[in-house]
Image: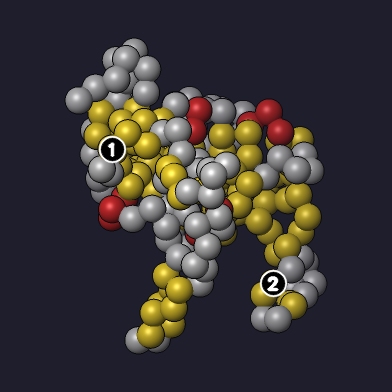
């Protein structure tokens, strides 16, 4: 199965939502709402790439995708339905612009152009609120970037435009997806 224009993917581990967290030996459902975008599964496995595509992503790679890819929602009649990318069973199509990271077997994550992933920096005074460190607003460290980009490097401390960040959990870490054009400063 191939597509002339879209990536064909399936949800990683076969689930649409990533809403179960384990604390000790007990599993908790942290959200039961299908409308909660913060717990949609953002990992997918590539079934095939578009006919036009000749980049580094290939079959069986794991990719980080847009938060609405696997999401269910209620239509105007109040009926539960899938989004536009759903085809059948566990098969979905996706635009290249909705893939943000990819990972080959045994390799590290790589960002897709024009995105990079930024790890927020803690405030210098290590202030905590409810046992969580307060972050420096609009500052962070580059964790993942596209291979072909040389304007920033992994480990660079940067500042980015307000409202340009979007939160993801990648391997348990909170990271922000930021377009490269929204990086303002290298510090």
Q: Can you see residue 79?
A: yes
Going by the image, does 98 lie left or right of 13?
right
Q: Which mark is residue 174?
A: none
Q: Please tell me which residue lies in front, 115 or 1.
A: 1
For label 2, count other residues whose C-alpha is less than 10 Å away and answer few (under 14), some (14-19) or many (20+): some
Give the SS element for disc 2: strand
With respect to residue 187, does 27 lie above or below? below
Residue placed furthest toward the front: 77
With respect to residue 170, does 75 lie above or below? above
Quadrant for residue 135, please give it.
bottom right
Q: Residue at x 69, y 72 (%)?
A: 133
Q: Residue at x 29, y 20 (%)?
A: 3
- Estimate the x, y position of residue 113 in percent, counting from the top left: 52, 28
Q: Are marks 1 and 2 in contact (CB under 8 Å)?
A: no
With respect to residue 81, does 120 lie above or below? below
For label 1, count other residues whose C-alpha is less than 10 Å away and answer few (under 14), some (14-19) or many (20+): few
Quadrant for residue 104, please give it.
top left
Q: Please tell me which residue lies in front, 12 or 128.
A: 12
The residues bearing labels 1 and 2 have C-alpha atoms spaced at a distance of: 43 Å
Q: Please tell me which residue lies in front, 152 or 31.
A: 31
What residue is pinned by disc 2?
Answer: 133
Quadrant for residue 53, please give it.
top left
Q: Which mark is residue 88?
A: 1
Placement of the N terminus among the 4 image quadrants: top left
Going by the image, does 15 lie left or right of 142?
left
Going by the image, does 185 lie left or right of 179?
right
- Estimate the x, y position of residue 61 in percent, counting from the top left: 29, 39
């Amino acid at each position: 199965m191939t597509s002339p224009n879209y990536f064909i993917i399936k949800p990683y581990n076969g689930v649409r939502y990533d809403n179960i967290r384990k604390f000790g030996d007990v599993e908790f459902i942290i959200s039961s709402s299908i409308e909660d975008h913060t717990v949609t599964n953002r990992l997918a496995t590539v079934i095939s790439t578009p006919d036009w595509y000749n980049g580094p992503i290939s079959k069986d790679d794991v990719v980080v995708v847009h938060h609405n890819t696997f999401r269910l929602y209620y239509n105007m009649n109040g009926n539960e339905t899938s989004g536009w990318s759903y085809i059948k069973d566990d098969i979905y199509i996706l635009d290249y612009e909705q893939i943000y990271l990819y990972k080959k077997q045994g390799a590290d994550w790589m960002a897709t152009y024009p995105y990079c992933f930024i790890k927020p920096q803690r405030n210098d005074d290590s202030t905590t609120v409810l046992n969580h460190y307060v972050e420096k607003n609009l500052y962070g460290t580059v964790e993942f970037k596209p291979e072909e980009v040389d304007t920033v490097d992994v480990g660079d401390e940067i500042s980015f435009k307000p409202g340009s960040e979007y939160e993801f959990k990648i391997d348990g870490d909170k990271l922000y997806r930021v377009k490269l054009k929204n990086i303002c400063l290298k510090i």
